Image (cartoon, rainbow, N blue to C red):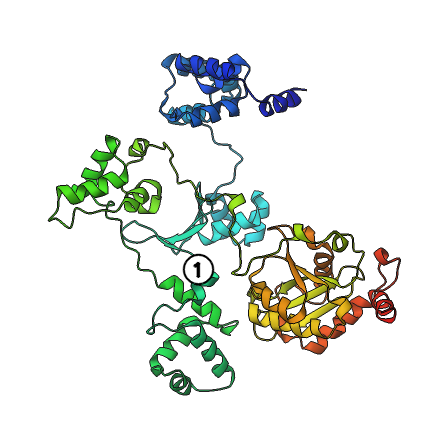
Amino acid sequence: MSALTDTSRSSRKYSQLEKDRFFEALGRGGTVTSVAAELGLDKMACYRWTRTAGIQLRDQEATGEQKNAFFDLFGRLGSATDAAAQLGLNRNTCYRWIQKAGLARKRVDQPSREDFRRLREAGQSRRDAARALGIHPTTAGEWDTGVRKTGKGRVYPDGRVVDYKQGVSSFDTPSGQPVRTASPGLAALQKAIAPRYLSLQERENIRDLLAAGKSQRKIAAALGRPASTVSREIARNSSPATGYQPYAAQRSAASRRPRPKDSKLAAEGRLRKYVAEKLDIRWSPEQISNALIKEYPNDPEMRVSPETIYQALYVQARGGLKREVQAALRTGRTRRKPRNTGEERTSRFADPMVMISERPPEIEDRALPGHWEGDLITGAYNQSAIATLVERTTRYVMLVHLPGDHTAETVGNGLVRIMSALPAHLRGSLTWDQGAEMAAHKSFTMATDMAVYFCDPASPWQRGSNENTNGLLRQYFPKGTDLSVHAPEDLEHVAQELNGRPRKTLGWDTPAERLRDLLLTN
């Protein structure tokens, strides 16, 4: 009953009078938790009100009486959670108190890295040691390889730092400033930087000429490049498992290209002192940047852009200004606010997408044949793929062979080739997800006269028949295998087997029988 009461209380709207009472009680020295409990308000709603009002709660300190009362109750109950709940205090704050006081107790039965190391030195395998200590095999693997866990992510022995909250990886450097790396997007990957850099097209030519058995000197002559350039490119970007792959090589080159340097505000000096002082009297970063030009017109060292100041405040890796100075910013935020929201999602492709919500109802209820769902199944390291097509009414399956790669051009040509062989009444529409392989959807529509509808992001159920078929196909094409070894004849054989299976949803008819009936009646 209490859970239902809490849910209804947090979902209802509060009046302005209740908000005024809350702020009045909070101003008398209470905490958000205690005031919310006293007035019968939802705690999370109260925290939202304080954030909206710009009140910095972390600056509020508990009174000495509250701390003494907590420690007395903690000594009797032995539980920080219970003591905090009875006194209306924040549980995390109370845990910090007992940790600083040295009263935090570690579980005696909790295994440690030292216990694991002793078992490994005694000759036990990683799996046996993990089972003996009752820890997860993944944890055992991290302990064995020296991976350290942090509050935000993991630190690897080679210096790589993975921050799961911000979605970035970085490498620690001698200066203490981590160098961040990120995977470039498709547009950045294909963009030509300058003639002195190898382009994606040149890397594709290198792959093709290597496959044709050409020597590195002949490849260099064909590209008009020095032989040493081609030699270094192949040596740097080849994989023992997959050989030289142009897109992987382009990604590696793009990630190596940045030359990050320390922020101008990372080191102590006149510039950093000036910026901190002006922030302390609530100047904006833009005001500071322009004031420096007027006050120090002949000193180029006293220059900083507004963005550099914002990065020094918000981005930990580019920091340099103390966190308490952040309170001087007028927004009162401690992290940057994204400009766009989910409703402002930009189009994935240059040509506008027609979303599945605009698909006619006769396609939705499977009343008319000739409407297809499609997707890709990929192989090991996403290096190979097969395009799968399922007719919504008959569940008839067709597989598209994709030799070499699964770029938008290759996928588009394969779909045009296989769809053009169908009768006109079986070429109604195609429903696909928002994968980059459908960037040429407008060209496909012009070549086949088939409308293309796109599913919403992360909504695979909108192509239910295709998703089910992809699961069946994994019996023939397991995950993690190289799909490029399968010839078109192999794909045709698999499609025939699937189309020859009786389906419950078809009244135990086969997809081949249903398609045959459609062809005979038209």
Whole-percent x, y for residue 265 in the image = 24, 45
Report crowding for label 1: few under 14, some 14 to 19, many 20 or more residues within 10 A (C-alpha): some
Whole-percent x, y for residue 513 in the image = 86, 67
**Residue 514 versus residue 340 in the image, above or below:** below
* Quadrant in which the C terminus is drawn: bottom right
Splitting the image into 4 quarters, where does residue 261 fall?
bottom left
Whole-percent x, y for residue 341 in the image = 50, 43
Secondary structure category for the residue under label 1 = loop
Q: Does residue 88 appear in this view? A: no
**Is residue 129 rendered to the left or right of residue 312?**
right
**Is residue 457 rendered to the left or right of residue 256?**
right
Whole-percent x, y for residue 442 in the image = 59, 65
Report which residue position mark 1 lands on: 184
Count all numbered tags in the image, as a single digit.
1
Identified at 61% across, 66% down, the residue is 379
Residue occupying the far left of the picture: 298
**Residue 405 versus residue 257 in the image, above or below:** below
Of 181 and 243, the residue lying toward us? 181
Of 110 and 382, the residue lying toward us? 382
Question: Callout 1, which amino acid?
Answer: Pro
**Residue 458 versus residue 466 in the image, above or below:** above
Identified at 54% across, 53% down, the residue is 126
* Quadrant in which the N terminus is drawn: top right
Identified at 28% across, 43% down, the residue is 309
Of 176 and 519, the residue lying toward us? 519
**Is residue 19 rendered to the left or right of residue 283?**
right
Splitting the image into 4 quarters, where does residue 390 fall?
bottom right
Splitting the image into 4 quarters, where does residue 215 fall?
bottom left
**Residue 146 versus residue 51 in the image, above or below:** below
Q: Does residue 224 appear in this view? A: yes
